[in-house]
Image (spheres, coloured by chain):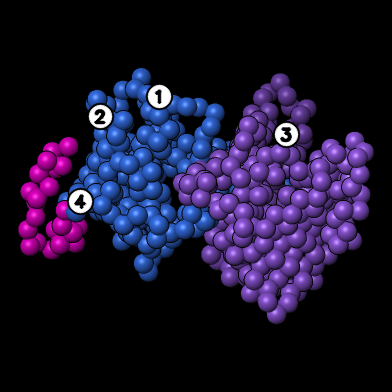
Chain colours: A blue, B purple
Amino acid sequence: MDDLSTPNLTRSDSEATAQTSAPVETDVDTAPASANISSHDLATQLVAKLCHDFISPAGAIMSGLDLLEDPSAQDMKQEALNLIAASAKKMVTLVHFARVAFGAATSSEAFSGSQLEKILGDMYSTMRAELDFAIDPQMLFDKPASRALLNLGLLAGNSLPTGGKAKLEAVKSDDGMTITAESRGPRARLKAEAIEGLTGLPLGDGLNGQWIQPHWLYSVVHEARGTLDYTTDVDSLSFKIFLPA
Amino acid sequence: MDDLSTPNLTRSDSEATAQTSAPVETDVDTAPASANISSHDLATQLVAKLCHDFISPAGAIMSGLDLLEDPSAQDMKQEALNLIAASAKKMVTLVHFARVAFGAATSSEAFSGSQLEKILGDMYSTMRAELDFAIDPQMLFDKPASRALLNLGLLAGNSLPTGGKAKLEAVKSDDGMTITAESRGPRARLKAEAIEGLTGLPLGDGLNGQWIQPHWLYSVVHEARGTLDYTTDVDSLSFKIFLPA
């Protein structure tokens, strides 16, 4: 996490640095409140994202079944079954992630590091980035901290579109919990929509689907009266969340 | 819709009437605002409901795949495929419903009566109640009206746990749209949680899953500055929503 302590280290006038933008720090407490999106819209946009995520594996399962029943495609039976199996696994992965990251998850009051690593690791198996979950398997996370960790982990992975490694750490102290993520890889970056979402700004010209998940992370931290800072650098991004006890 | 105009017709001191409770009318405009649930909670509880709905068919597909691969269950192959097919269809039905009823559904600005009948009819195919969709297939519904219609339709069907018929109607006027539902069947009733949700009250002792969808309907009508009334009677329930133009 060296970059966090020296956010200005690589600032220069080089094109590369200009493209990755200067270090930005955002304090959720002083950022505009999420009132710029109505409670109704927060829910509908989150559900729209979920439906968008779910419809693809659900449709793939239907396609696999069609293929199974097609008499002219009997040589494709195994491929069809593989498609159905992979899509069903993806569906279950998405639901398990959504339950904790976006849902109320009323059946469990707290999650262990190992439980959260399993949920997030399954999501990473569908992504290009690699997960380095450097958190004690026994460490306990309450619901807000679990939501923050999973959403930060997803964002850290999504900010590595061509691959790389996302490292997650968490430290408890007397006054709360600090969760950090470092995404390191070629083309590590946040899209404009993601920056708007993460800083509590309304969506500009971009895509809702790119905006809502970072905005949800902002909302989770805001709801817990925490702070969220991030720093962009050449081929790396650092995020730091503090949640008060 | 006779019962709507004569809500007191069957009031008496009989036990049956006492059980179904006296007619209740609720005006969303004057009811407590949905501020008693935070924007965050509205989203998390809606997502929790969706995840709960999705995990059952997703798990059934996994079970079907396990059965297909079990060498000792080769005589169950067709049952396994049937289970996978039925569960995949249910999943697609749920996602299509959720997209319009709960999600932002940004890909379409308006829905026709026939589109909404298809979405709701597929949901009813998984329920005991029968749907009587007495709405012009050509009639156009904007997003808030589509959401209100689908959620009212689902609630009307869910209030007939042992079967019966739910009739939906919609009338446009210069000042807005009126959507009505009549649920008629043995044991037609709203659970206590559903009444709390529908009237904008916080959840009491009951189950979140029974509360959130009626509360979402309340929230949809509230967001559109509309009104929502309902009347309970022996073996029937009537709902009336008005959405201003």
Q: Label 3 neighbourhood size at 10 Å, few (<14), some (14-19), many (20+)?
A: many
Please report whichever mark, 4 or 2, sits nearer to the chain's N-terminal start: 4
> Label 4: chain?
A
Nearer the observer, disc 1 or disc 3? 1
Q: Which residue position holds label 2?
A: A175
> Label 2: chain?
A
Looking at the image, residue A72 sits to the left or right of residue A162; the answer is: right
Q: Which residue position holds label 4?
A: A25
At label 1, the amino acid type is Ser
Image-quadrant location for residue B69: top right
Q: Is label 4 in a helix, a strand or a loop? A: loop
Residue A96: x, y in percent?
51, 36
Image-quadrant location for residue A201: bottom left
Q: Which mark is residue A112?
A: 1
Farthest bottom residue in view = B174
Which of the two residues, A78 or A88, is positioned nearer the viewer here?
A88
Query: Which residues fall within the magenta stretch?
Result: A1-23
Please report whichever mark, 2 or 1, sits nearer to the chain's N-terminal start: 1
Q: Residue at x 58, y 70 (%)?
A: B109
Q: Which mark is residue B80?
A: 3
Q: Is label 2 in a helix, a strand or a loop? A: loop
Q: Label 1 neighbourhood size at 10 Å, few (<14), some (14-19), many (20+)?
A: some
Nearer the observer, disc 3 or disc 4? 4
Is the residue under label 4 in contact with that under label 1 (CB below 8 Å)? no
Residue A147: x, y in percent?
41, 38
Nearer the observer, disc 1 or disc 4? 4
Q: Residue at x 67, y 62 (%)?
A: B227
Q: CA distance from mark 1 to mark 3?
A: 35 Å
